Image (cartoon, coloured by chain):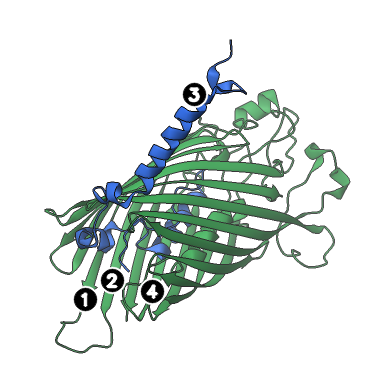
Chain colours: A green, B blue
Amino acid sequence: MQLTRSLSAIVLLGAALAGGLARPAAANTAEAAARVTMFDEPSSKNIGVRVLHPQADVSATVASAVNFAAGYSADVVTGATPATFDTVSAATKFSDTRHLVHGGFGFERSDGGISFAGAYGWESDYKSTVISGTTHHDLYEHNFTLALAYSHNFDTVCDADNTAAAGLPLDRVALANSSGCFTSTPGYVTHSLQIDTFEPSLSWTMTPRLVLQGGATIQILDGFQANPYRKVLVGSQSRTPQEHLPDFRQRYALFARLAYAFPELRASVLGMIRGYDDSWAVKAFTADVTGTKYLGQSMLISGRAHWHVQGGASFYRDAMGYQILGPAGQYWTGDRELSPMGNYLVGGRFSFFRRPQQERSSWFVEMELGGKYEFLYYLPQSPYAPNADRKFAHIIQGAFAMRF
Amino acid sequence: MHSRFFSKNPSSRTRTRTRTGLILLGALLFSGCSLSKWTVKPHQRELLADKIMQLDAEPQERAAEEHVLANREGAIGGTGTSGGGCGCN
């Protein structure tokens, strides 16, 4: 079961950059961190989906100029395919594990820096290799920071051999399982997916309390982007061909972020708004705000709210639409992320810090223990939308970090 | 009638005015004296250096969050590429 699909680029870029862009706070610093995140999406019709996401990262900065970062993460997924009748006739259980390793290094100067990173992710039916580079430069007495990030994915996707259905997308059959993927077993093929992601941004330290950032994300995907397991009930003759998506997609986002300090409250607010458009006609708007406050000398608490709304892809129809009207052109999908929908997310987080007293020597600088809970509520626009049996999800995270 | 902004042969007076405007704009943007009134000085950055003011303070946690939401929303981007303008070095 593919866990990453075509969206892995921005995720892997984020993971690959973890630590690469972190600015050194002292001449020699190091950090080791471990996190476990559980994503639980119950279903009203079956066991839903549960994802365990452990991750471990280490990073080090030497002489304030050179930093290294490396890490490992995994997704252990168990669940059932969505029980909506537009995609499959019966929900089936599945389980799979995705692994990801990443590493990177960077050079920092007083007014800028550059870093490079690589990541490799693999699972039974999907392999992903990402290379990325970032640079940032401070301007006007460190009041502006111009940053550029680029990544390229070399992904490989396993699929059923549909050579006989070339030019006849309604005859395409879905992949039944991944047992023969990436082998010479007849009936299996691999497709390529190339992803280029470019993200420039400009930050402005506007006042001693306020930092603003504006930027853009441009992503171009070229290759197989469908879920090879997904069937879509198309037309009134009970035909269930494999999901069929265009091979090419251009995605654009404009975003603005801010950080504002409330020193009298020992608190801050971070905010983000984003507008999104792509060549499949998905338009979206997202807003995110996080408030964080110190409690005493060793405790941080924060609350977060997130709101997202989007329109559907030009070829999207809900289950009833595909059955009554047939496909909208030569493509069809049962992907919730291509349907008109929205979501709300609210949650809270705490961190407890332990710092040795200055006068006592210690083998560490700081120890952090944290936890987080978030509730994600989906807003599908139709009762016949994909994954309509999954209304909400819980996100729970525990984290531990040591800084030296 | 074409707007003069689309004219292929602007008058020399227009060119002079444009050039003067660009010089003034450049002088404003690149003059340390004019910007120094608006810049945030190093000694004013105490709040900005705090970890709760960093747009990308927890990159590993942010990667995990993106991993969850990017696979459940049809949009990407907006995570930023660098914490902004702290100048803490």
Q: Which residue in the protein does label 1 denote?
A: A354
Q: Position of residue A55 (x, y in %)?
A: 45, 70
Does residue A111 sit above or below A403 in this rendering?
above
- 3D distance between C-alphas at marks 2 and 1: 9 Å
Quarter holding residue A184 = bottom right
Q: Residue at x 63, y 58 (%)?
A: A152
Parent chain of label 1: A
Closer to viewer: mark 2 or mark 1: 1
Q: Are marks 4 and 3 in contact (CB under 8 Å)?
A: no
Q: Are marks 2 and 1 in contact (CB under 8 Å)?
A: yes
Label 1: few (<14), some or many (≥20) within 10 Å?
A: some
Q: Which mark is residue A147?
A: none
Label 4: few (<14), some or many (≥20) within 10 Å?
A: many
Discs 3 and 2 share one subunit: no
For label 2, the SS is strand
For label 4, the SS is strand
Q: Which residue in the protein does label 3 denote?
A: B13
Q: Position of residue A6 (x, y in %)?
A: 62, 52
- 3D distance between C-alphas at marks 4 and 2: 10 Å
Q: Which residue in the protein does label 4 denote?
A: A33
Q: Which mark is residue A369?
A: 2
* Earlier residue among tags 2 and 1: 1
Discs 4 and 1 share one subunit: yes
Identity, as a three-letter code, of the amino acid under mark 2 = Leu
Identity, as a three-letter code, of the amino acid under mark 1 = Arg
Q: Position of residue A16 (x, y in %)?
A: 51, 66
Discs 2 and 1 share one subunit: yes
Q: Are marks 4 and 1 in contact (CB under 8 Å)?
A: no
Instruction: Judge by depth and name the residue closer to the eye, A15 or A230.
Output: A15
Labels in figure, total: 4
